[in-house]
Amino acid sequence: MERVYNFAAGPSMLPLEVLEEAQRDLINYKGSGMSVMEMSHRSKQYQAIFDETEATLRRIMNISDDYAVMFLQGGASLQFSMVPMNLMPKGATANYCETGIFAKKSAAEAKKWGNVITITSGKENNYTNIPELTDDIVTDDASYVHITQNNTIFGTTYHKTPDIKKCPLVADMSSVILGEEFDVNKYGIIYAGAQKNMGPAGMTLVIAKKELLGKAPEDTPSMLNYSLMADNGSMYNTPPCWAIYMAGLVYKWVEKSGGVKALENRNKEKSALLYDAIDSSKLFTAPATENCRSYMNVTFTLPTDELTAEFLDFVKDRNMTNLKGHRAVGGMRASIYNAMPIEGVNELVKAIKEFEAEK
Amino acid sequence: MERVYNFAAGPSMLPLEVLEEAQRDLINYKGSGMSVMEMSHRSKQYQAIFDETEATLRRIMNISDDYAVMFLQGGASLQFSMVPMNLMPKGATANYCETGIFAKKSAAEAKKWGNVITITSGKENNYTNIPELTDDIVTDDASYVHITQNNTIFGTTYHKTPDIKKCPLVADMSSVILGEEFDVNKYGIIYAGAQKNMGPAGMTLVIAKKELLGKAPEDTPSMLNYSLMADNGSMYNTPPCWAIYMAGLVYKWVEKSGGVKALENRNKEKSALLYDAIDSSKLFTAPATENCRSYMNVTFTLPTDELTAEFLDFVKDRNMTNLKGHRAVGGMRASIYNAMPIEGVNELVKAIKEFEAEK
């Protein structure tokens, strides 16, 4: 069987040439006599891989020395707790923007630590839009404002970084990092699970403005303390070495592909093909409001559950998989991260048109 | 270059046939059209891999249904915090056995949560021995007793599970799990980072007696709550899919190799070859007390730093690497986990003898 077009929300597709390189070097990495999976994280060999990974990421995201880069574990879900524990004293106040399920989860974890004020909510519209976030609605006592930059489940996104001056802006970028160009300097903390657009599951990237670090209480578990992680170069304990190596291969692939801006343009093109097909259809509908439609996760629905099931069956024979939408939205979701080739999107567009023609 | 004998303390060697299988299936796993690294953790394909991994582990360790098995993230170091947070109310008392550096670290994290009573310590003897742990020295208020089953840095181990009846016994088995046979029923919690004897870094195994779960306070971060992890089959969020898959391959290799008992016997044989060579030498010394010498991490020293440097140089040309000891012990450390073939140990024994003959 050939490789399948995998539209999963994450873990999801990786660039084929990245997988080929990983496969080639798996048993004996560049003549070292061992796999990357067998390397001591304290060895020069592995440190070189690690350093190159960080340096490549800093280049492609244009991350200045004012920011620490950490490769951690636990996914975005652990960041939901680490962010409040590291950015504010217990019981202090943070502002959250409720734009989807993961946004709600991040606020729920923060509530265990402090006072959460929800300053925007898309709940009334079933999260089909992104309410505007401006500095004047940020409360004066906010230690930070948290946003979910791209909502994987609802397929909505902040295409423009909110201009927040009152306090640091914290963003969960799990499903959009490297998919659009961002000015890191506008953020206090950026975090992202690797498994959507950066590599395999098991690594979490944290980019943190250095001046924000060092505020965690003394009784914070060491593994949840940003300062300790940053000061130890993400090696306070054994890091997820293989996942970091794989992310490094993806970062180099991004650079070789022309950088984040080139991929953003390609992602705009890919998603436009899909949204155009949906919008010009009389059968399919895209629920996300037009000005906040994600380039990464394209959600679309059919009028009935029967038609939805029929369509999902229809695409199965066409070498496409994981198109079923999240139960909160229903219908379909096509996650078309950087590694999804335009050919995959074309196949899906073709399927949408042919399915409608048959009806 | 051929494959090297890698004596690293972890990450360390993996069985060659495990690496070969991972390499073969890396791009297109068993005709699925995708890599395991690209599989949605919510897919049937991945769930099958996950279920088989857990089932194999339960077979080889003889884990009963009274125990939950979790595949988590964060390494043993995060368990240092999760154990107290899940097993006792804030401020309650736990007993710790100080048998090395990781034992001290585990107690230090517990101190942030509760009252730690150190009931045994090998400090006076620079941790060359394992002080006896018996039920009568356990304090009546102890929520649990924590041991480091095998001390990677000092090369010492509890060959016999302490018989604790007053409260649950918790063991960090990172460097000995699957290397010796243990009766799981004697433990409340067993945890282990994967990267020494089970797979690549990035996955942490937790085996927990179910009756101990459900006690974490409500404001515990979700990712640190055993119950939530167990109830969600380790998939509260995206698990470290690749590392779990790799561990599954290792578990099957253990089973194929005759099971844990067969590997324990092989490990006894391997370590005896080394200890015999050291004990019969007039130059080399093994600092660990004889009745608690580890089968996994063999520490040995030379009289001077110059000789140590010379020996480490001497072995380099013999296709052996990572033999330098931890700075706390000095000298050498040969970590000879399950995946280290006996040929590697023979090479090292040969080097020890030839080095001494040259002096």
Image: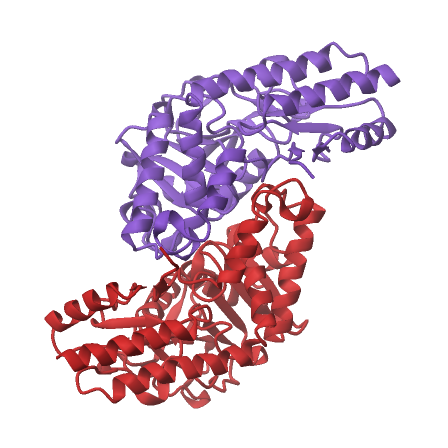
Chain colours: A purple, B red
x%, y% of residue B200? Answer: 46, 56
> Looking at the image, how many numbered discs can be counted on the residues?
0
Residue drawn at (58%, 21%) of the image:
A294
Instruction: Please say if B149 is above or below A137.
Output: below
Instruction: Please say if B246 is above or below A189.
Output: below
Residue drawn at (76%, 23%) of the image:
A301
| Left or right: B110 as drawn, with respect to A300 | left
- Closest to the observer, B99 or A323: A323
Residue A123 in sight in this render: yes
x%, y% of residue A88? Answer: 38, 40
Instruction: Please say if A47 is above or below A134.
Output: below
Residue drawn at (16%, 67%) of the image:
B309
x%, y% of residue A6? Answer: 65, 34
Residue A81 in sight in this render: no
Question: Residue A292's image quarter?
Answer: top right
x%, y% of residue B337? Answer: 42, 71
Instruction: Please say if B272 is above or below B229.
Output: below
